[in-house]
Image (spheres, grey):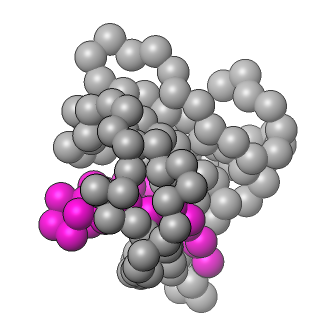
Amino acid sequence: MGRPSGRGHRRVPHTADVRIEAWAPTRQECLAEAVTALVATFADTGDAPASGTGGFTVPPGPDEDLLVAVLDEVVFRLETEGVVPVATEVVAADDGGARVRWRTVDTDAVTPVGAVPKAVSLHGLRFGPGASGWCCAVTLDV
């Protein structure tokens, strides 16, 4: 992916949809960074103070399924509750799944900067360990 070490994300060119990459030292941090990358494609959260909290558990499964489940939950909560995560924490569950907790803000408190994702595409999906940590690449249907 040609990425720096540490933790971060970026948007990469794609013909019709939105493609993001995220990286971090651990699987859990990479999942959290992918959430931040997804949100950055459609909203500038700026200094919006968190107005709520949320959480959910993802069952064990392949790493790619875990990534899709976490990002799908962001899209679901956006559509059904009108909230956007502004801070995400992912903790490994004993069974191989994950527990996700986030602080959220209402959508009316953020500045729109792009098309809202409708789904996570499985085409070109990547998530796994690399030479200097974990990385993922995801295409978002808009």
Query: Residue 92: x and y, percent?
Result: 61, 78
Query: Residue 22: x and y, percent?
Result: 60, 41
Residue 97 appears in the picture as rendered: no
In-image side of 40 versus 83 (left or right) = right
In-image side of 99 versus 56 (left or right) = right
* Residue placed furthest toward the top: 15
In this view, 60 is above or below 129:
below
In-image side of 27 versus 59 (left or right) = right
In this view, 101 is above or below 33:
below
The quarter of the picture where the N terminus appears is: top right
Within the magenta stretch, is there residue 108? Answer: no
Residue shown at 20% from the left, 43% from the top: 118
Which of the pair 110/135 is nearer the observer? 110
Q: Please identify the dominant SS of the magenta region.
A: helix
In-image side of 28 versus 56 (left or right) = right
Which of the pair 26/141 is nearer the observer? 141
Question: Would you identify the image quadrant in which residue 15 lies?
Answer: top left
Within the magenta stretch, is there residue 86? Answer: yes
Residue shown at 37% from the left, 32% from the top: 113
Total numbered labels? 0
Query: Residue 33: x and y, percent?
Result: 60, 52
The stretch of residues the image draws in magenta is 62-91
Which of the pair 2/32 is nearer the observer? 32
In this view, 132 is above or below 30:
above
Residue shown at 27% from the left, 41% from the top: 117
The quarter of the picture where the C terminus appears is: top left
Query: Residue 107: x and y, percent?
Result: 30, 57
